[in-house]
Image (tube, rainbow, N blue to C red):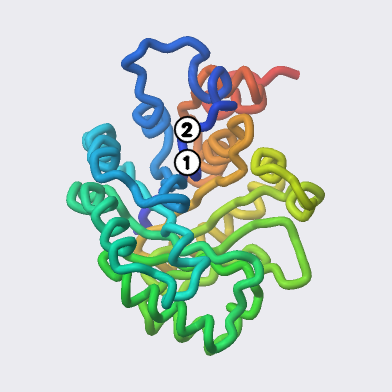
Amino acid sequence: MTARPHIGTAGWSYPDWKGVVYPERVPESFDVLRYLAAYLDVIEINSSFYRAPDPKHAERWARAVLDLDRFQFTAKLQKEFSHQPPEDWSSAAVTRFREGLAPLIDAGKLSALLIQFPFHFDARPARLEHVKRLAATFDQTPLVLEARHRSFLDPAVLRLMGELGLSFCNIDQPHSGTSIEPGARTTGPIGYFRMHGRNRAAWFKKGALRDEKYDYLYRPTELKSFVPLIRELMAKTERTFVVANNHYLGKAPANALELKGLLEGLPVEVPDTLVRQYPRLAVLSGGAADR
């Protein structure tokens, strides 16, 4: 029997989620991570892309979800390693990043490390050497590679990824001449599918801010088109993760829960605040959406 996919969001703490995903007023003891983890199967740690996690924070994150058996984290690799050549890495930075994730690994709560490359990172030989160094340096955790340049679809490159033990990250993103279309490609034991949204105008606009780029609510028909791809990933891999990154105003958890309903069936528990923001979600828990 194929294991159920882990469905969730990239990140969990955004100022614009207050009153949309989380209640407007909460006690001081309110834990936003614990609150969201009760509805989702995975959260991808975003902050690790910008700086190494503090081990004390990672220990607290693990403790917050330890009793949620299905819940898992994935984490982004720090951009110092994905966006800079290996000769610029410091051994201290590598150690600091490894140590920052150790509490999650020790708790059995970190399923994968996502290596995210920029759009221009293509599969030329020098850059594949970069990939090899990453695979050798961060091999303590299953690795998933998110390349956005279609040269990574070359069969020889995909074969190399498999030889290195790297799992392919399938993505939905605004289209460009070199972009990769959504698919169900696999090169390793993990199936991974990320949804960035389709806000093309903002995505390629010079000076556009993060919230503007990721301001996109997938339509139900668009979500349904992902279902056969995700099911194929589930059939071909040991574990499958689906991560919504269209975070602005809670659109990521909204779409993640809708996909959960499509893949696992209804009912799906949804935060009341999120239903008020997106009334169509009411049908997930058996309610009637506003007409």
Residue 91: x and y in percent read 29, 68
Quadrant position of residue 256: top right
Residue 141: x and y in percent read 29, 63
Tell me the residue at 49%/51% (across/down).
242
Asked whether residue 208 is in view, the answer is: yes
Q: Which mark is residue 178?
A: none
Asked whether residue 219 is in view, the answer is: no
Task: Please tell me which residue lies in front, 258 or 29.
Answer: 29
Mark 1 → mark 2, Cα distance in angstroms: 6 Å
The answer to whether mark 1 and mark 2 are in CB contact below 8 A is: yes
Residue 3: x and y in percent read 36, 55
Q: Amino acid at mark 1?
A: Gly
Mark 1 lies on residue? 11
Tell me the residue at 25%/35% (across/down).
60
Mark 2 lies on residue? 13
Is 115 placed left or right of 246 in the picture? Answer: left
Q: Secondary structure at mark 1?
A: loop
Tell me the residue at 47%/43% (across/down).
8
Quadrant position of residue 112: bottom left
Task: Please tell me which residue lies in front, 16 or 195.
Answer: 16
Residue 12: x and y in percent read 46, 35
Q: Amino acid at mark 2?
A: Ser
Is 60 placed left or right of 267 in the picture? Answer: left
> Which corner quadrant holds the N terminus?
bottom left
